[in-house]
Image (cartoon, rainbow, N blue to C red):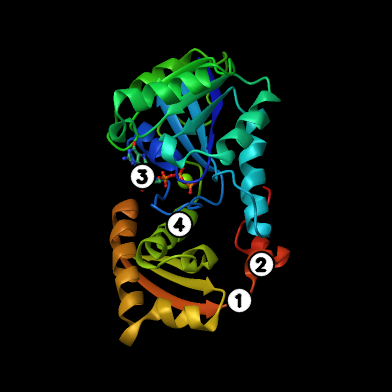
Amino acid sequence: MRSGFIGIVGRPNVGKSTLLNAILGEKIAIVSDKPQTTRNTIRGIYTEDDAQMVFMDTPGIHKPRNKLGEYMTNAAIHTFNDSEAIIFIVDDKLSAGPGDKYIVDLLKEVDTPKILVINKVDTMTPDGYKEIYDEYDELDLFDNIIGISAKEDHNVGLLVKTLMDYLPEGPFFFPADMITDHPERFIVSEIIREKMLHYLKDELPHGVAVEIESFKTERNLVKIGAVIYCEKKSHKGMIIGKEGKKLKGIGKSARMDIESLLGAKVFLELWVKVKENWRDSDVMLSNFGYKDE
Ligand SMILES: Nc1nc2c(ncn2[C@@H]2O[C@H](COP(=O)(O)OP(=O)(O)OP(=O)(O)O)[C@@H](O)[C@H]2O)c(=O)[nH]1
Ligand SMILES: [Mg+2]
């Protein structure tokens, strides 16, 4: 038997969470077109015959502007030394910049084997791909370079197969049928946050946190009560929307996803509260689960 942890790191928005979901063939990590979607390290368990890989999808590494950002970036960097191999993801050349260089410099300091994944090849020309490939190949830092499309499931299987070579002998960490060790409550709060990212514009969803207040199963109905925290009174109005329409849309779309996650009918109640500057409050960050485990 072989088993090990694999870290997935990179700048925000390169497709780390999309890749995790593609590997698992199930959606456990939320995805959005806005950077800094993932805030905690999300563990996804992939088991095949006699091998188990625990993937750690991490928050995008960026220059922090508040304590939440510091927590996120630290969480990602922590996985460097806890992994048997690190997947470093980059995407198209246009969005590359100092962020990727910063991560490369950090990676130079660690001995863990590194695989470069060039994601979003579906958006690239062969020349564009080659340019990125050559740039990273020259660094002589990576054990392997693979081009994939996480979104279109292109070469994801090849990546998993490649990673098998890095797994040491050892027993499984989790039961073979387990896909994540995060509690359902956590995934539910993430689904609600994902809908906020989809429905709200600009900076607003970045200042949102979700707390599950109640979670009760009554026969085939799951009753969930959640509080959405935002940073300003004006934001509360925007989240609720005219005649509560926005919040209703967020609730409906979250409920549908939660129902398919839990395989049961869901009654979802949402409240919106204001907590000014929570992203810089140690106490609030810890309440919302943004703390070292
Ligand atoms: N065209 C294309 N888009 C992709 C691909 N993979 C991911 N995306 C898109 O890129 C955006 C970001 O994807 P995420 O998976 O949330 O990225 P992330 O790296 O986890 O981002 P953070 O959690 O913010 O660090 C989403 O709009 C995805 O649909 C891909 O292979 N091709
Ligand atoms: Mg993510």
Q: CA distance from mark 2 to mark 4?
A: 17 Å
Name the spot of residue 112 as percent of width and height, x first: 63, 21
Mark nearer the N terminus (2 vs 1):
1
Q: Give the label on residue 275, or none.
A: 1
Q: Give the label on residue 19, or none.
A: none
Kindly report which numbered mark, 3 or 1, lies closer to the viewer in this rendering. 1
* Residue pointed to by mark 4: 190
| Image marks 2 and 4: residues in contact by CB distance under 8 Å | no
What residue is at 51 percent from the left and 67 percent from the top? Answer: 208
Q: Give the label on residue 27, or none.
A: 3
Helix, strand or loop status at disc 3: loop
Q: Give the label on residue 284, or none.
A: 2
Above or below for 78 versus 171: below
Three-letter amino acid code of the residue under disc 2? Met
Mark 4 burial class by Cα count in 10 Å: few <14, some 14-19, many 20+:
many
Residue 86 falls in image quadrant: top right
Mark 1 burial class by Cα count in 10 Å: few <14, some 14-19, many 20+:
some
Above or below for 280 versus 110: below
Mark nearer the N terminus (2 vs 4):
4
Judging depth in this view, the residue of 253 and 222 nearest the camera is: 253
Three-letter amino acid code of the residue under disc 4? Glu
Callout 3: CB less than 8 Å from ligand 1: no
Name the spot of residue 159 as percent of width and height, x first: 40, 22
| Image marks 2 and 1: residues in contact by CB distance under 8 Å | yes
Q: CA distance from mark 3 to mark 4?
A: 11 Å
Q: CA distance from mark 2 to mark 3?
A: 28 Å
